[in-house]
Image (cartoon, coloured by chain):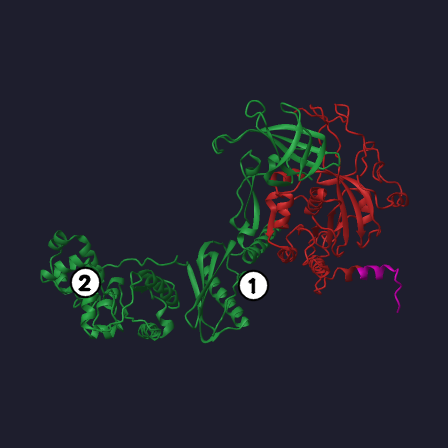
Chain colours: A red, B green
Amino acid sequence: MTVSASTPLYASLRERIAAIGSDGRMRALESGGDDKAVALGHALADRILGGGLKRGALHEMRHAEPGDAPAATGFALACVARFGSGGVRPWMWVRQDLAGRETGEAYGPGLAALGLDPSRLVILAAADARDVLRAAEEGVRCAALAAVLVEPWGDPRALDLTALRRLALAAEESGVPVLLLRNGAHGGPAGAVTRWRIAAAPSLPLASLGRLPGLGHPAFAATLERNRQQGGLGEGGSWIMEWSPDERAFAPPRPGTEQAPRHEQTHGAADPAAGAGPAAPGDGPVAPAFRPAAGGGDTAPLRRTA
Amino acid sequence: MLTAVDADAAAAGLAPGMPLATARAMVPGLAVAEADPAADAALMETVADWAERYTPFIGLDAPDGLVLDIGGSAHLFGGEAAMLDDLVGRCRRAGLTARGAIAGSRAAAVALARFGRDGQGTIVAPGGEAKAVAPLPVAALGLHPDLAGALVRLGLKRVMDLAVRPRGPLAARFGTDLLTRLDRALGRADEPLSPRRPLPACTAERRFAEPIGHEEDVRRSILALAADLGRILERRGEGARRLELVFFRTDGALRRLTVATGRPLRDPATVLRLYREALDSLADPVDPGFGFDVMRLSALATQRQDAEQTGLDARRQDDALLADLTDRLSARFGHRRVLALAAQDSHVPERASLAVPAQAGRAPGSWADWTVPGEPPVRPVRLVDPPERIEALAEVPDGPPVRFRWRRVVHAVRKAEGPERIAPEWWLAPEGTLTRDYFRVEDEAGRRFWLYREGLWSRETDAPRWFLHGLFA
């Protein structure tokens, strides 16, 4: 008997086969949707990704310019917080010593302020890129972790396609997502399921007592450069994504206050928005309507007293 | 002056304490070597290390003696006599002059080994110490030479002469120390052994008739040792927090390998995994040479561990897996490279978050203070420590910077929040530490920085310096 590729039976078989890790064991299909994608909270990005970022996969974050390394860090940490589902599960940050020296060390109060739980964090301070990879692989194999943030520095030779494939495979087997933070990198292999290029974006100004407006929630100009996720639309996009530490989720900028990303939008993001039906207001590609921050209380109705 | 003589020299009439000129006159062509107490001590340490193959309970009897507590290990060598023969024989084959004795009290054994007639192979049956020690000279009690000389001049030459005297007058004349030493030598009292190294809580060991060297054999042996130790620990209701594995090579060399754990541990497979990590990461690998003939696994530190519970909830299961991971990473990369952040009760930024070895366990500090609902992050995710000098242009006296230069790049400030004034903790800070005014700023590109001005303008300094202390997401 022949089975048409479009029958439900075929689809469900494919699903089951996909759930079998390369070690031949079934991954936890029934483990409360652990394998499923985790929505970022930004509706358009989630739709293009096919529901959000997949667990058990390798995701890569790069900075647009070297000065955007903290922004790329923040975006990767925000994704960790998404995967952390409430912050109860432990997570791990493997960073090369050089990365700590160049862009600063993980700071507990700042992590907490961003919505992560520093008390569930294990930091591995690796001397070089080889140790980064070895430790990362060890970490990824530990199913208890919500996510592993892997931060080599620059373009080390050890970080080749084979190394990335090993990481991706380990992630697939355990279901633990890997976020590869490529600070200081210029090139490098493409072994990730998704690749993001992150730049800092001006935050929504808050009222302030001073002459200058105050800072709003962290905002990122995020460009999805590579999207190979199963179930995703396969295309990229470019959005301003604002992170809400309270909700532990991304939110689209509020209507009327969109800000343009500093970097050219690489993708015609208008097309997916048009093709995918009505998007939430402010969800789509943003108009270059950044209001220069004029001080004073009229900018936003948010309080500021101190 | 001669400090030591060998058998030939002794036969020629030489003795320690003799002036060198006299000795040379008696034996022309005498071979002399300068005394080197430090080298002698180092040799004794090596011998003591080697002797650990007999028992981990070893003390030094300075300057040239070893005391081994062989309770419980003699049977492994086919009895006390065989063990003593083996030990003394091996020492002699290595070119050392060795004498040994076994007795129920430490002082009796030392006295017999040093002063016994036949030197080797004296084994005193339990309770026989008094009789065995009685004919020895009083110096065998380990007395100060002056006191020993005084006793001999009084005609008290042998231990038995003292043993039969009334104790009161002896104590009155020579002090209670003499009686204590006498009691110990006679086996009426014992003194504890002061071990060279911390004593393990429990140990397991394997001896191999055929020395092993293959990786697979070593691995299997570690697993077997871990299983033995695990059973002992389980009986005690404990788990190991620090483990030491000692490899004894047939040529006498020895290698110790210590691993620590973040929680009590007794599962053999986990112990093996830790040791594989530790062995893999050694810069100087364990060389089996001609093979190991003894391996010993000891729990140096233990902690109460209740029987494994089944039906753990998810959080505890996660914690158990995480503890395993931390232990493995610590064994491989060193415990200083596997870190946890501990919240500290300090408002000085660089002291508020402390990276500590994850195995040490976390301090109970809370991070809750830093999550302010509705508020953008008030602290950066990455702390640049030490803070980096920047050039900044700012309003006086306490306005935010208008522009600043960091790492050769100029940033124009578009948004700013501050100042947040942080005074030095005067009870900790050195004299002259200045107040800091912190600002959160955002530049024209949207990059967010944490800057501070050091020193209150006109009150503390006329030329405040600016620093960058952190980077926001």
Picture coordinates of residue B252 (x, y %)?
41, 70
Residues under labels 1 and 2: Cα distance? Answer: 53 Å
Quarter where residue B152 is shown: bottom left
Give the secondary structure at mark 2. helix
Residue B139 is tagged as: 2
- Pick the residue in front: B408 or B415: B408
- Left or right: B201 as drawn, with respect to A262: left
Give me the disc on residue B280: 1
Residue B164 sits in quarter: bottom left
Give me the chain letter of mark 2: B
In depth, the one of B64 and A175 nearer the eye is B64
* Depicted B414 relative to depicted B16: above or below: above
Do badges 1 and 2 share one subunit?
yes
Q: Secondary structure at mark 1?
A: helix
What is the magenta range? A1-14
Chain at numbered mark 1: B
**Dot 1 amino acid type:** Asp
